[in-house]
Image (cartoon, rainbow, N blue to C red):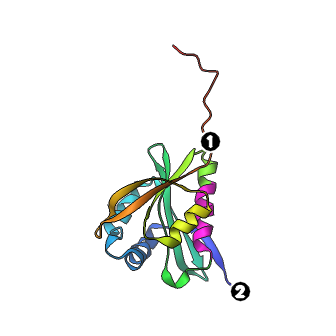
Amino acid sequence: MTDIRLQDFTEADLDWIADAEVTIFGPSAWSRALIREDYRWGHNRYRGVQVDGQWGAYAIYGFDGDAFHLFNLAVVPTMRRQGLARLLLDEVIAEATRLAASEVWLEVAVNNDAALALYRAYGFEPVRVRRKYYQPGDIDALVMRRVVHPYEPDHTATNL
């Protein structure tokens, strides 16, 4: 039986994330210093999945200004096709819903077919392209969003 656990990362786990970033994203990976600084800043949630006691996937998400943003969702190659990305994406959307975010935003490389299929399956829609967003490599990013709570204007407000 496989033991799958979703849990928050601690500062002691950040080296694992940095190593996984290099494995998964190569030269466009977040640096170890950036990961540590972002984590210590404390505005984003670092959430991971352990499979039989080994980290296998992670998501970094939170509010970026007034927008709820999925900054990173990644699964190590040896643990792909086990539903770990879906487990994390379910968690991200549940958190956005709990926090009453109106939308969830993300960027995804236009050549990442697996991620694009996952996000589309979850109701994310393309908004625009950010040209040469991923460096090095000059890879375009597709900005996508999913509406969580549709905007409803307050009709009781009075105009001044």
Q: Nearer the viewer, residue 50 or 124?
A: 124
Residue 111: name its quadrant.
bottom left
> Is 97 positioned to the left or the right of 104 in the image?
right
Bin the neighbour count of mark 1 within 10 Å (Cα to Cα): few under 14, some 14-19, many 20 and up.
Answer: few
Name the front one of labels 1 and 2.
1
* Residue span colored magenta: 83-94
Is residue 31 shown above or below 147?
A: below
Question: Is any atom of residue 75 visible in this view?
Answer: yes
* Type of amino acid at the residue the image marks with label 1: Pro
Reply above or below: 101 against 142: above
The residue labelled by disc 2 is 1
Q: Which residue is mark 1?
A: 150
User: Could you tell me the amino acid type at mark 2?
Assistant: Met
Q: Residue at x 37, y 77 (%)?
A: 22
Q: Residue 89 at x, y = what percent?
A: 59, 63
Whether residue 88 appears in magenta in the rendering, the answer is yes
Regarding residue 36, the answer to whether it shows in the image is no
Left or right: 45 in relation to 21? right
From the image, which quarter does the N terminus lie in? Answer: bottom right
Q: Please, what is the dominant secondary structure of the magenta stretch?
A: helix
Q: Where's residue 36, x and y in %?
A: 37, 64
Disc 1 or 2, which lies upstream in sequence?
A: 2
Residue drawn where x is 67% and y is 83% of the image: 2
Q: Residue furthest top?
A: 160
Taking the spot 61% from the left edge, 63% from the top edge, the residue there is 121
